[in-house]
Every structure is written in structure tokens, then in C-alpha cells.
């Protein structure tokens, strides 16, 4: 990796971590406040709509954001074309979903969803105005600016949500919180992206050029959206809305934790991997390479990729297994005993949550290589098999279905490992070297911490003791093992501060 790319990567990871960290801290505070004022039914009402808003959002962007990032030197025409497409597509999607609102309400047997869904669906209309700007910032690794925007948007929207919840507006607090977040986020993007200003045009030439690559990304994003929300959708149909809200609460905390790492690496992974392959094609169509050039690309990208994956596992494994360890104390102390039933669901989700940032790395590798077809089919088979496994456990209840989902997500990493091996020469033995030490170390630390703190009765003291002891033990274990990722993190922090 060249020095300039190394510096960009370190800087991007730093601001990505700061962005994700501050975001999750604010999310934690806001989430605790809202959970203490709202009911599980309120969360269930808005939770069942997530799959619709997420799919509509995927359709409006249609993968062209990734298409922009994958172009070496995108032009103003490229950005304007994607901007216009997003705006027009979002208007069409909102019109469709507006008239589908009664059908959605009837499916979940919740009449209030007619009005709520029509308000919540406005989020992706507003979001369409800033998608191209987000692609511009990602392409140019404006991670510091994205951190600032994200923090301001979250604080503003959290204030709106908490105020409405305090006034007794129930699920409307969650609905308007989403709209406020997207609105402030777009204002921030417009403030920082001054080199390019959008124009609504009918020039879709660049969009057509990106379409073969972008449409495969679109299909894959929809599949990922369905995969991430399939349990909420299924539960919304077969279980009471209160139980759905309980699962939504567990899923929210799990997602907040694993996205701390996923967003940190995800903000720069594609851009860094594209730059690490200097002879990568400008378009999504793979170009023939000589064996020498292929070997050169493999060596460079493989080094970059392995280092980023080790960094991902170094953070993700202790974070998520640690959350599983303290989930009971965390839930009872923050949002109250009324949410105690979501503890076992959260513990099960944390197991797969530890590996979700690894998925982010593999997916960005595929996109950076222009291999959106392979990326798409791996995710197609994932959702097909995933739904089959989940439904097979239907008779055993919600917890069994969540456990089956979590186990499947861990196992499904195997096809991704095989794909990476064929793409950049990532051997299975290297996969084990890069991931297994962190998995085993984190698991050993959590088991030791659990038994060492069993005698503590006070919940606040137990939570503090487990967090502190686990952090110290993991750091000492990494230090004694001479883990290079830890050394690099220490050197960077010392240099930065």
C-alpha cells in the first residue's frame, strides 16, 4: 500500500470510527429516552414498515451511488444524471406506496398503518435529494464532514422524537424522528458539497452506462434489506404487535452495536479497494488482464484487504460478544424491566452481529472489483435459504427463529470466503489466521469475565465490572500476543494526539 493511500485509509478509519462512535452514543441516549416513554406496540407499528421504506430507498438509488464511487473520476454530468434519476424514481415510489398503504395496514391487521405509512414513506422522497451528494462525499473520503453531519442530524432528530414522545404522541414520535433525521442530513450534505450543485436534467446517459453494474447492486441491496428485515416482517404477521416491538428493540440494539464497526470500515472500504487496484476499469465491465498485472493487483489488494479485515475483527468480536455478555444488565438498567423479554433475543442476535462487519468487507471487495453479478447471486441464495431455515423453526416460537437466523448468517460467510479466494487469491488458511484469533480471544475473555463476576449482585456494579474487566483482559491478551493491528492503532493514536 502506498504511503498516500495508507494515510487516507488511516484518516478515513479515524473519522469513520469517530462518526460511528458519536452516532451510537447519541443513539444510545436517544434510544433509552424513547424506550422509557414508548411502548413495545409503538415500536412494533413503526418496525413493520421498515422493510417497505428500506426497499423503496434501494429502488430510488438503484445502486448508482456505488456506481459513482466505482468510477475513477466521476464528472458533474455523472452526478447530475444520478441525482435526477433518484428524484424521479422516489416520486414514483412514493405514489405507489401511498396507494398501497391500506393493503399494508390490512396485511398486518393494524388500521393506523394507513396514515403512519404515508408519513414514514416521505423519508425516501426527502432522501433522494441527497443521495448523489452522499456518493460525492464517500468518493472523496469526506469522513470528517460526514461525522459532523451525522452527529447534528441525529441530535436534531432525537430532540424531535423525544419531544413528541414526551407530549404523548406515541408511534408518531418515531415516524417524525426519521423524517427530521433525513432532512437535516441533506442540509448538511448541501452545505459541505460546494464543488458541485445538482441540476434536475433528463440526461440519463451516465445512468445507462452504469446500469449493468448498478442494477445488480440494486437487486443485491433489496435482498440485503429483505434479509435484515425478514424476521420483523414475518413476526408482524404471525405474532402480536407487542412481541414484534420487543424483537425490534433487540434488533435495534444489535444493529447499533455492529454498525459501529460496519460503518467505520464501510465508509472507506470501497474507495480504498478501488484505489488499491490502479488498473481497475472505469466501467463495471471486467477487462482482460495479463497474468503479471493480475498478480500485481492481487498482491496489493490482498494486503490492503487482509489488514482491513483484521482491523474489523479486532473491533467487532469483543464488542458484540461483550454486548451478549452484559445484555441483561444493559437492558434492565437503561430501558427498564418492561423490556426484559428482549434480552435472550438480543443475545442470539449478537452472535451473528459479530460477523456482520465481515460481510461489509466482503461486499465492498466484490463491488470494488466490479463483480456485482457474483455479489448479487450470493445474496439471492442467502435470502432464499435464510427464509427456508427460519420458517422451518416456526413451530418452536420466536426465540428459535431468531437463533436459526443468527446461526445461518454465521455459516453463510463460507461462500463469501470462497468467492474472495477466487477473486484476489485469499486462501482459507489466511482466513483462519485473520479471523480465528480474534474470535477465540474475545470468546475466552467473555467466558472468563462471566465466571469472575458471578458473585456480584448489584446490577450497576455488575455491568461496570464486566465491561471494565473484559476490556482490560482483551487488551492484555492482544498485547501479550503482539498483535500488529493493536500496535498500529496505538501508534496512530499517539501520533494523532
Image (cartoon, helix red, strand yellow):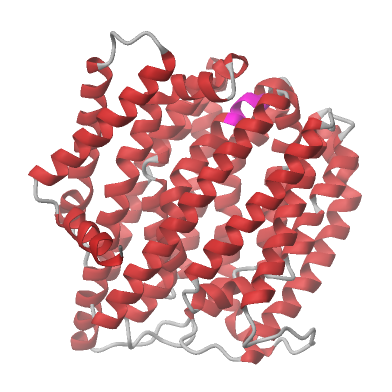
The kind of secondary structure the magenta stretch mainly shows is: helix
The part of the image, by quadrant, that contains residue 173 is top right
- Residue 186 located left or right of residue 349: right
Above or below 28: residue 35: above
- Is residue 124 magenta-colored? no
Query: Viewed as shown, does residue 87 lie left or right of 323?
Result: right
On the question of residue 306 being in view, the answer is: no
Instruction: Pinpoint residue 52: horizontal percent, then vertical percent.
Output: 73, 48
Q: Quadrant of residue 152?
A: bottom right
Which residue is at the front of the view, 231 or 324?
324
- Residue at image location 22% in from the left, 17% down from the top: 452
Report the span colored magenta.
244-249
Q: Quadrant of residue 190?
A: bottom right
Q: Position of residue 486 (x, y in %)?
A: 20, 53
Per the image, is 245 magenta?
A: yes
Residue 40 in view, yes or no: yes
46 sits to left or right of 409: right
**Residue at horizontal 59%, vertical 69%?**
63
Left or right position of 312 against 147: left
Task: Work out which quarter of the rendered image holds the C terminus and state it.
Answer: bottom left
**Depth check, front residue: 346 or 27:** 27
The residue positioned 47% from the left and 33% from the top of the image is: 405
> Which residue occupies 73% across, 49% down?
178
Q: Is residue 102 above or below residue 261?
A: above
Residue at the extreme front: 497
When the figure is inspected, residue 1 is found, relative to residue 152, above or below; the finding is below
| Residue 105 location (% of width, % of height) | 85, 35
- In x, y percent, where is residue 349? 46, 32
Amino acid at each position: 500500500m502506498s504511503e498516500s493511500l495508507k494515510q487516507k485509509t488511516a484518516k478515513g478509519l479515524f473519522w469513520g470510527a469517530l462518526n460511528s462512535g458519536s452516532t451510537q452514543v447519541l443513539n444510545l441516549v436517544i434510544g433509552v429516552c424513547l424506550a422509557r416513554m414508548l411502548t413495545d406496540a409503538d415500536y412494533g407499528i413503526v418496525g413493520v414498515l421498515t422493510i417497505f421504506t428500506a426497499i423503496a430507498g434501494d429502488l430510488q438509488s438503484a445502486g448508482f451511488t456505488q456506481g459513482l464511487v466505482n468510477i475513477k473520476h466521476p464528472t458533474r454530468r455523472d452526478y447530475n444524471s444520478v441525482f435526477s434519476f433518484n428524484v424521479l424514481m422516489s416520486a414514483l415510489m412514493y405514489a405507489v406506496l401511498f396507494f398501497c398503504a391500506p393493503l399494508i395496514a390490512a396485511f398486518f391487521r393494524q388500521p393506523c398503518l394507513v396514515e403512519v405509512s404515508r408519513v414514514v414513506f416521505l423519508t425516501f422522497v426527502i432522501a433522494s435529494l441527497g443521495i448523489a451528494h452522499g456518493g460525492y462525499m464517500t468518493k472523496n473520503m469526506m469522513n470528517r464532514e460526514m461525522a459532523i453531519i451525522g452527529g447534528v442530524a441525529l441530535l436534531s432528530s432525537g430532540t424531535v422524537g423525544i419531544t413528541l414522545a414526551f407530549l404523548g404522541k406515541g408511534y408518531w414520535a418515531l415516524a417524525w424522528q426519521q423524517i427530521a433525521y433525513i432532512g437535516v442530513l441533506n442540509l448538511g450534505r448541501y452545505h459541505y458539497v460546494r464543488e458541485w450543485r445538482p441540476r434536475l436534467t433528463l440526461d440519463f446517459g451516465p445512468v445507462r452506462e452504469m446500469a449493468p453494474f448498478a442494477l445488480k447492486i440494486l437487486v443485491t441491496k433489496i435482498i440485503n434489506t429483505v434479509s435484515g428485515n425478514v424476521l420483523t416482517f414475518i413476526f408482524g404477521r404471525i405474532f402480536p404487535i407487542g412481541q414484534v416491538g420487543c424483537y425490534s428493540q433487540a434488533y435495534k440494539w444489535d444493529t447499533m452495536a455492529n454498525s459501529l464497526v460496519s460503518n467505520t470500515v464501510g465508509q472507506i472500504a470501497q474507495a480504498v479497494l478501488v484505489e488499491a487496484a490502479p488498473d481497475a476499469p472505469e466501467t463495471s465491465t471486467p477487462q482482460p488482464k495479463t497474468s503479471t498485472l493480475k498478480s500485481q493487483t492481487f498482491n496489493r489488494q490482498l494486503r490492503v484487504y487482509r489488514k482491513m479485515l483484521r482491523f474489523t475483527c479486532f473491533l467487532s468480536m469483543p464488542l458484540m460478544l461483550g454486548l451478549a455478555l452484559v445484555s441483561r444488565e444493559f437492558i434492565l438498567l437503561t430501558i427498564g424491566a418492561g423490556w426484559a423479554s428482549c434480552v435472550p433475543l438480543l443475545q442470539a442476535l449478537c452472535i451473528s452481529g459479530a460477523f456482520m462487519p465481515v460481510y461489509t468487507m466482503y461486499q465492498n471487495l466484490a463491488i470494488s472489483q466490479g463483480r456485482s453479478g457474483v455479489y448479487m447471486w450470493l445474496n439471492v441464495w442467502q435470502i432464499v435459504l435464510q427464509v427456508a431455515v427460519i420458517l422451518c423453526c416456526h413451530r418452536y416460537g420466536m426465540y428459535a427463529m431468531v437463533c436459526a437466523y443468527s446461526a445461518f448468517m454465521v455459516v453463510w460467510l463460507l461462500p463469501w470466503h470462497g468467492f474472495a479466494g477466487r477473486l484476489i487469491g485469499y486462501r482459507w488458511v489466511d482466513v483462519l489466521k485473520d479471523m480465528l484469533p480474534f474470535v477465540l480471544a474475545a470468546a475466552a475473555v467473555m467466558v472468563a469475565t462471566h465466571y469472575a463476576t458471578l458473585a456480584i449482585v448489584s446490577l450497576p456494579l455488575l455491568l461496570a465490572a464486566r465491561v471494565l474487566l473484559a476490556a482490560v483482559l482483551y487488551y492484555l491478551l492482544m498485547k501479550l500476543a503482539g498483535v500488529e493491528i493493536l500496535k498500529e492503532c496505538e501508534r496512530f493514536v499517539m501520533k494523532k494526539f
